Image (cartoon, rainbow, N blue to C red):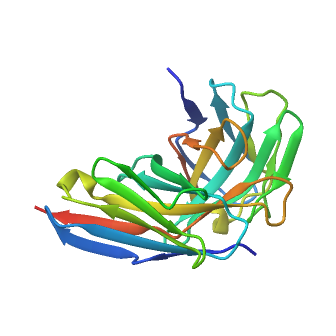
Amino acid sequence: EAQVTQNPRYLITVTGKKLTVTCSQNMNHEYMSWYRQDPGLGLRQIYYSMNVEVTDKGDVPEGYKVSRKEKRNFPLILESPSPNQTSLYFCASSLSTGNYEQYFGPGTRLTVT
Amino acid sequence: GENVEQHPSTLSVQEGDSAVIKCTYSDSASNYFPWYKQELGKRPQLIIDIRSNVGEKKDQRIAVTLNKTAKHFSLHITETQPEDSAVYFCAASSKYGGATNKLIFGTGTLLAVQP
């Protein structure tokens, strides 16, 4: 089954404790991205990747890191989480660029206290 | 930067009525306009999209119209059903600030279909 998976689905952590949210897709998609969803703000792109070892900032990259060492995986790293990073995070993949259907993962609900 | 505005933020209709959600965008180079539906607690899923070389596209009860001159596009849902209740997001592609197209999303419309 073609899908995008994320782990963990729920995470409660404390300020400053490094964490990683994993994302994996099995559709051989080139383009992957991370979004955060906040009430009233819609979906905002954090980082995206055009292919292996090619990443670029989205609209809200501050406080986040990403890497793309393999085509199927695109982890999101929060080196020192802060309460303003409490949000719902979605990973997405598409065939190529943002001009194609984005397939979203199930989401990760992150709470930073 | 590129901006996508979406209205209304909430919409309540009676079952069987039509619903219309409108979006405007700022980047005149945008050429791809998808609509996503997000049911409560679920992930966004594409329901329809349109590219800039067409003005209208239909898929059963759903249609999207695009006016490139005015830089706005709309989602039309006819004969609404309770299962249409969800948050709907519009988006527009943009290369602004980057080397490749990315999607800029609107802020979402919560559609409630009353039985």
Rendering quarter of residue A15: bottom right
Residue closer to the observer: A44 or B18? B18
In this rendering, does residue A18 appear at all? Answer: no
Quick check: B25 above or below A48? below
Residue closer to the observer: B67 or B88? B67
Farthest residue to the left: give it.
B115
Quick check: A70 above or below A8? above
Residue closer to the observer: B88 or A35? B88
In this rendering, does residue A84 appear at all? Answer: yes
Image quadrant in which the C terminus of chain A is located: bottom right
Rendering quarter of residue A111: bottom right
Q: Residue at x 75, y 34 (%)?
A: A30
How far across and down, in percent of the image, does residue B84 sit?
27, 55
Q: Residue at x 59, y 36 (%)?
A: A7
Quick check: B20 above or below B42? below
Is A94 left, or right, of B22 in this rendering? right
Q: Residue at x 20, y 63 (%)?
A: B113
How far across and down, in percent of the image, does residue A4 sit?
57, 33
Rendering quarter of residue B8: bottom left
How far across and down, in percent of the image, does residue B54 sit?
54, 57
Is B82 left, or right, of A15 in this rendering? left
Q: Residue at x 18, y 55 (%)?
A: B81
